[in-house]
Image: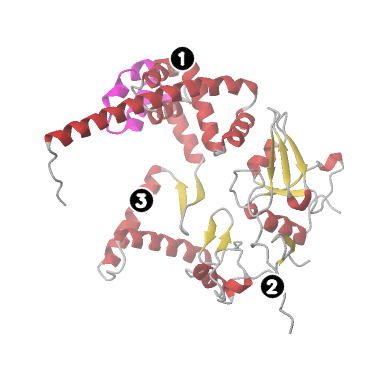
Amino acid sequence: MTTAILHPADQRSASAALDRYCELERAIAHLQAQQTRVLAELSRYGSTISVAAEVALAVHADERYVASKIADARDLTTRLPFTLAALDRGDIDRYKAHTVAKLTRALSDHLAREADLVLDGRLLKKPANLRHAVNRVIHNLDPEGYERRSRQRRRERTVTLLHQDHTMSTLIADLPCEAASAIYASLTAAAKRMRQLDKTRTVEQLRADILTDRLLNAANGDSSIKAHVYVYVDLLTLAGLNNDAAHLPGHGPIPAWLARHLATSPTSTWSRLITDPDTGQLLSVGRTKYKPPADLDDYIRVRARTCQTPGCNHPAQFGDIDHTTDWQHHGETNEEDLRGKCGHHHRLKDEPGWTYLAGPGGTSIIKTPAGRTYTSEPEPFHEPRKPPDDLPPC
C-alpha cells in the first residue's frame, strides 16, 4: 500500500490539525488532574469500596475502574506530587500517571516520593516500555521488597473470564512469567506444525483452538463443552420459527444459530421456564430455611441473570443469593426477599450508609450514603406478547 505525498497546503492543514489534537490532549490531561483532586476529596467520605460504588452509580461507570482511579487519586495527591504536576501541565497523559501510581503503590510513602523524584522528567522521554522503566526504578530503590512482592504475586495467580462482543470472550490467566511464556511457546510451536497441514486456519486461530482442546480434553476426556452454563432462548427460536437472539448472562445476546447449536448438543441439559406472556418476566423454573432450597436458588439466579446492582454484569449463576432483609432482622427465604448479587456487591451492603430494599417482581432498590436512590429491575425474558386481533365477524 502506498500513501500519496501531501501538497504544501495539505501539509499545513495536517500540521494545524495535529497541533490542535496535541492541544486538546494537554487540556484533557489538565482536566483529569482536576478530577483526580476531586476524587481524592471524595475518598475522605468512606471506604474505597463504598465511594467507588457511589461514583460508579452516579456516572454509570465500571466500579473496578472507578476504584482504580480513587486509589490513583490518593497516591498522586499525597505521594507523587511531581507525577501529578506533570499530568496537570499536560506533559503526560492519565495512562502514564496511572502506571506510576499503580506500580509504586507497594512502596512506603518515603520510597514512593523518592521514586516520584527520580521519574520526574524521565516520563517525558517516552521510554520504550514505561512499565519496565518504572519497575527498574522500584527495584533499585527497594530490591528486598521487590523480591518479597514477587513471591506474593505468584501466590495470587488466577483465571478470569471477561465477556466481549459478537459471541466472543477473553479468558485471562495471571501466571508466573516463566509458566506463561512456556505455555505460549508450546501453543505457538504446535500451531505452526498444524498450520503446515491445515491452511484453512491462521496461526492465531490454531493457537486458540489448541488451547481450547487441551483444556477441555483435560477436564472431559474430549474437547466437547460440558460445563453447566445458563443460555436463555425462546422455544420458537429453538424450533427455527424465528431468529430472535438468545441471551448468555454476562455476555448479552447470541445469534439464534449459536443457541440452536448449543441446545442440540448431546451434552446440554434443559430447564423449563414459565414466563408471564404479558410482561416477559419469570414465573417459575419448575418447582423455611436460611439457605434456599435448590429450586428456589435456581429461580433467583435465573430471574436475576446478572448481579442485581445497576451496571454490574457478573452472571448470577456464579454469584451469591442474598437476603435483602438480613436473616437476623427477620428476613425471609423466599422469592420476594432474595436477590442475586456478586460477592463484591454482597459485601457492599455491610458498608455504612448503604440500604437495600426489595421491590415487587424481583426489583431491587438501593439507597447510597450520599442520599441517592437507584432501582434495578430484572430484564424480561422476551418482549410482551401482543394478543392477536379479533377475528372479523362472519
Cα distance in 3D space between marks 2 and 3? 62 Å
* Contact flag, marks 2 and 3 (Cβ < 8 Å): no
Position of residue 45 measured from the top left corner of the image (x, y, whole percent):
64, 22
First in sequence, mark 3 or 1: give its number.
1
Residue drawn 33% across and 58% down?
204
Residue 277 is drawn in which quadrant?
bottom right
Q: 156 or 345: which is nearer to us?
A: 345
Position of residue 373 measured from the top left corner of the image (x, y, whole percent):
70, 35
Q: Which mark is residue 110?
A: 1
Based on the picture, tell me whether residue 304 belongs to the magenta stretch: no
First in sequence, mark 2 or 1: give its number.
1
Look at mark 2 in the image and give the residue it sits on: 388
Q: What secondary structure is marked by label 2?
A: loop
First in sequence, mark 2 or 3: give its number.
3
Residue drawn 12% across and 34% down?
8
Position of residue 337 measured from the top left corner of the image (x, y, whole percent):
79, 48
Residue drawn 47% across and 40% down?
154
Mark 2 neighbour class, 10 Å CA radius: few under 14, some 14 to 19, many 20 or more: few
Q: Which mark is residue 386?
A: none
Look at mark 3 in the image and give the residue it sits on: 182
**Image quarter (top left, top right, bottom left or bottom right) of the C terminus:** bottom right
Specify start and end residues of the magenta stretch as a single range.
Answer: 115-144
Q: What secondary structure is marked by label 3?
A: helix
Q: What secondary structure is marked by label 1?
A: helix
Q: 26 or 208: which is nearer to us?
A: 26
**In the image, what residue type sits under mark 1?**
His
Cα distance in 3D space between marks 2 and 1? 74 Å
**Left or right position of 94 against 73:** left
**Left or right position of 371 against 162:** right
Cα distance in 3D space between marks 3 and 1? 38 Å
Residue 366 in sight:
yes
